[in-house]
Image: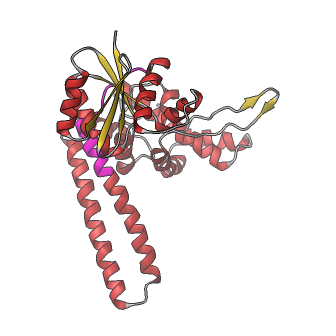
C-alpha cells in the first residue's frame, strides 16, 4: 500500500499529515527541516501532495526528488473547492495538509515527474526578468511626465540600469539552454514556427516544460486556450477560455498576430472564423490555440516546422 502524505507549505514551516495514521508533524522549511521530514516519511512507498508556492517549495521538492518519493502538485483553487465540497470551511495549515492527503486518495491523483533543477533556475530568472520589464514600463511612464532635471537624470540612469540587468538575465538564460542539448533542441523547434521568436520560445520552455508529453487538447487546456462549454437544459451559453497559465496565454497573443501575416494556413483559418461571424478576439484565441497545439506536436515528434506542418 502506498502511504499518502499531505504537506501545507509556508515560508517558515512545513505542516505534514500522514493519512494512514492521522499523525500531524511540523518541520522547518529549510534543508535541515526537509531532512527531518524525509526521516519521518520513512522508506516505505509514499506519495506527497502539496500546493506549489513559488520559491517556498523548491527545497522540499529537491529533497523529495532525491529520496525518490512520488510528488503530486495540486492547484490551490481546486484544493479549496474540494475542501468546500466536503463541508470543511475552516482554513488552517493543519487542516489544509489533511485535506490535501484526502483529496489525493479520493480523486486518485497521480504523481508526475518533478521539474529538473535547471527548470527552477530558468523560472527564477524569468520571474526576475518580468519584474524588470514592469519596472521599465513604470520608469518610462514617469519619464514622460517628469519636469525636474534631477528626477529626469535619475530616471534615465534607472532605465539604463534596467536595460543592462535585463540583458544580463537573458544572457544567463540563453547560456543555461545552450548547455543542455534537450533544451537547445526545444528552442530550435519552437523558434522554427512562424510567429514564435527567441523570447516567446524561451517563455514556452520556462512556462510549459510539459510540451511534447501530452496530446493537443491537454496542451491547449494547460495554456488556458481550450474553450469551455456552458450548457444547462435547453440553455446554451457561449463557450469561453479560462484557467490555465495566464502568463503563457498573454505571451502568445503577439506571436499569433505575427503568424497571421506570415503563415498562410493560419491566415486562412483566421479568415474562415471571421467569415463565420466570430469576433476578432475569438478568432485570435483560436490561432493561439493552434500555435500551442502545433508546438506540442513538433516537440513530441522532435522535428522543426515545415510549410505543410499545420
Q: Is residue 58 magenta?
A: no
Task: Identify which residue, 310 or 138, lies in the foreground.
Answer: 138
Quadrant of the image occupied by residue 236? top right
Q: Position of residue 128 (x, y in %)?
A: 31, 55
Residue 184 seen: no
Tally of numbered discs: 0
Question: In this rendering, would 75 be left or right of 7?
Answer: right
Residue at (38, 42) in percent of width and height: 207
Task: Identify which residue, 191 or 252, lies in the foreground.
Answer: 252
Residue at (44, 39) in percent of width and height: 92
Task: Identify which residue, 274 or 154, lies in the foreground.
Answer: 154
Residue at (52, 35) in percent of width and height: 80
Question: Which residue of the protein is positioned furthest toward the top in this rendering?
Answer: 1
Residue at (28, 51) in percent of width and height: 125
Q: Is residue 112 magenta?
A: yes
Residue 248 seen: yes
Q: Position of residue 302 (x, y in %)?
A: 34, 27
Q: What segment carries the magenta color?
A: 109-126
Quadrant of the image occupied by residue 22? top left
Q: Position of residue 56 (x, y in %)?
A: 31, 43
Q: Position of residue 219 (x, y in %)?
A: 47, 31
Task: Identify which residue, 229 or 184, lies in the foreground.
Answer: 229
Q: Is residue 212 above or below residue 144?
A: above
Q: Quadrant of the N terminus?
A: top left
Amino acid at each position: 500500500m502506498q502511504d499518502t502524505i499531505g504537506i501545507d507549505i509556508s515560508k517558515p514551516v512545513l505542516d505534514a499529515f500522514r493519512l494512514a495514521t492521522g499523525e500531524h508533524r511540523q518541520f522547518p522549511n529549510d534543508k535541515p527541516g526537509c531532512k527531518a521530514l524525509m526521516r519521518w516519511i520513512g522508506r516505505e512507498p509514499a506519495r506527497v501532495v502539496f500546493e506549489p508556492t513559488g520559491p517556498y517549495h523548491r527545497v522540499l521538492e529537491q529533497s523529495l526528488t532525491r529520496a525518490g518519493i512520488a510528488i503530486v502538485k495540486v492547484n490551490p483553487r481546486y484544493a479549496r473547492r474540494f475542501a468546500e465540497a466536503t463541508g470543511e470551511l475552516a482554513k488552517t495549515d493543519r487542516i489544509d495538509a489533511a485535506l490535501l492527503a484526502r483529496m489525493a486518495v479520493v480523486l486518485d491523483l497521480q504523481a508526475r515527474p518533478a521539474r529538473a533543477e535547471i527548470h527552477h533556475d530558468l523560472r527564477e530568472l524569468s520571474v526576475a526578468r518580468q519584474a524588470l520589464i514592469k519596472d521599465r514600463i513604470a520608469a518610462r511612464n514617469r519619464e514622460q511626465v517628469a519636469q525636474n532635471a534631477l528626477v529626469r537624470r535619475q530616471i534615465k540612469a534607472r532605465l539604463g540600469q534596467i536595460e543592462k540587468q535585463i540583458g544580463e538575465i537573458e544572457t544567463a538564460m540563453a547560456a543555461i539552454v545552450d548547455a543542455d542539448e534537450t533544451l537547445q533542441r526545444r528552442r530550435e523547434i519552437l523558434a522554427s514556427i512562424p510567429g514564435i521568436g527567441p523570447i516567446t520560445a524561451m517563455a514556452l520552455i520556462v512556462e510549459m516544460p510539459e510540451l511534447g508529453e501530452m496530446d493537443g487538447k491537454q496542451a491547449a487546456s494547460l495554456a488556458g486556450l481550450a474553450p469551455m462549454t456552458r450548457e444547462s437544459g435547453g440553455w446554451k451559453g457561449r463557450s469561453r477560455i479560462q484557467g490555465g497559465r495566464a502568463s503563457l496565454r498573454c505571451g502568445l497573443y503577439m506571436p499569433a498576430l505575427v503568424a497571421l501575416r506570415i503563415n498562410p494556413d493560419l491566415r486562412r483559418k483566421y479568415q474562415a472564423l471571421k467569415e463565420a461571424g466570430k469576433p476578432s478576439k475569438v478568432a485570435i484565441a483560436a490561432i493561439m490555440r493552434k500555435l500551442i497545439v502545433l508546438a506540442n506536436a513538433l516537440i513530441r515528434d522532435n522535428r522543426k516546422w515545415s510549410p505543410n506542418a499545420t
